[in-house]
Image (cartoon, grey):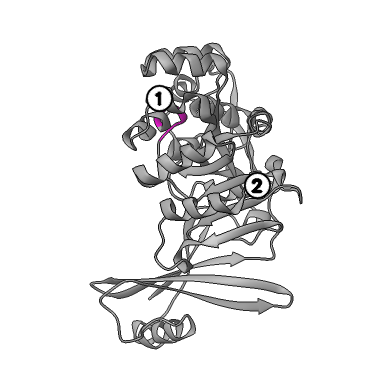
Amino acid sequence: MRLRYRIDGILSQICTLHVAYWPAICVRLKVMCEMNIAEVRRPQNGRITFYVGPREIDLRVASHPTIHGENIVIRILDKSRSLLALNELGYSTEVVLQIKKALKRPDGIFIITGPTGCGKTTSLYSMLSYMSTPKLNIMTLEEPVEYQLPLIRQSDMRELGGMGFEDGVRSILRQDPDIILIGEVRDPGTAQIALRAAMTGHQVFTTLHTNNALGSLNRLVDLGLSLPMISSHLLAIVAQRLIRKLCPHCKQERDMTPHEAVLLKRPCSQTLFMAKGCLSCRGTGYRGRLAIAEILVFDQELEERLMTTSSKLSLKALVKKKGFVSMVEDARYRALRGDTTIEEILSAVDLQGME
């Protein structure tokens, strides 16, 4: 039996126990989160809430059967932890400025895309917090609600009697909202009603699972929307990944290899930084995480181009001319600046194949 923590995205083994202890531990966890202790053949989900002083801690518990017995994963959410501001999310300064520019528009759809665990929900929460005032009615549909936000009406999909995102949005539209957050656009029905909400004067925030910003346009088409239909109702699309940040106390400068110079498109005379390890970072060489990202902000010129073509090459040429910085270019910049290592960059993006 192993106990492992995922810290900064990396699993670390903390200790091992004799397997004979596991059945009792497993049953105790199930009792605490009100799972069926007799059910060992099907996955189950539960939660445990407790307090550490004034801090409310929420544990999201998920069990899954394997050939060696049940595996249990516990996600720890500190509800008292303050939200990160936009400039604390690890984005580059330019990305933050572009996000704030897009948020000034009164209506449309704002999409954050990327794989599971890339910080999409945290980013959305920070944007809602940035916009939140007593004068706005902000409502969310989430599965689950990860953090409780002041002045925002949040709904947990699992507590709405089996209601799906499509019916949930339809209900929210009757609640006089100004801003709507939809946890994820999963099906054509949700995509259609999200677009309808944007067309009727609402700001809509949601997430997708695609590799990059332009790829989200293809995903929306797969969900039954046409590019001419959505072209004038998109605010921005942010694609992002999370990578570990070098510990500022122990990072070391080193020479760049010829192969790295090719990947980073820089001369070998430039230097990079590597992880070393110290007490401050528990010997890992890394401390915290940062976001490498790209943001596609929609304006009239891009909207007009989408009305006439769906060619990815044509769109890519246009956005590059307008100063679009791809996630790959952002990653190169972060490595060269000493924020992270090239090894971390390569674990998140393909420096040769994603441009």
Along the viewing direction, whichever of 277 and 349 lies nearer the viewer? 349
Picture quarter with the C terminus: top left
Helix, strand or loop at disc 2? Answer: helix
Prevalent SS, magenta region: helix
Q: Amino acid at mark 2?
A: Leu
Report the span colored magenta. 211-215
**Would you say residue 124 is visible in this rendering?**
yes
Give the label on residue 128, or none.
2
Q: Residue furthest left?
A: 67
Along the viewing direction, whichever of 241 and 251 lies nearer the viewer? 241
Picture quarter with the N terminus: bottom left
Q: Is residue 270 above or below residue 123?
A: above
Along the viewing direction, whichever of 8 and 303 lies nearer the viewer? 303
Query: Which residue is labeled 1 in the image?
Result: 227
Along the viewing direction, whichever of 115 and 298 lies nearer the viewer? 298
Residue 203: % across, % down? 59, 39
Q: Which residue is at 67% across, 50% downward?
A: 137
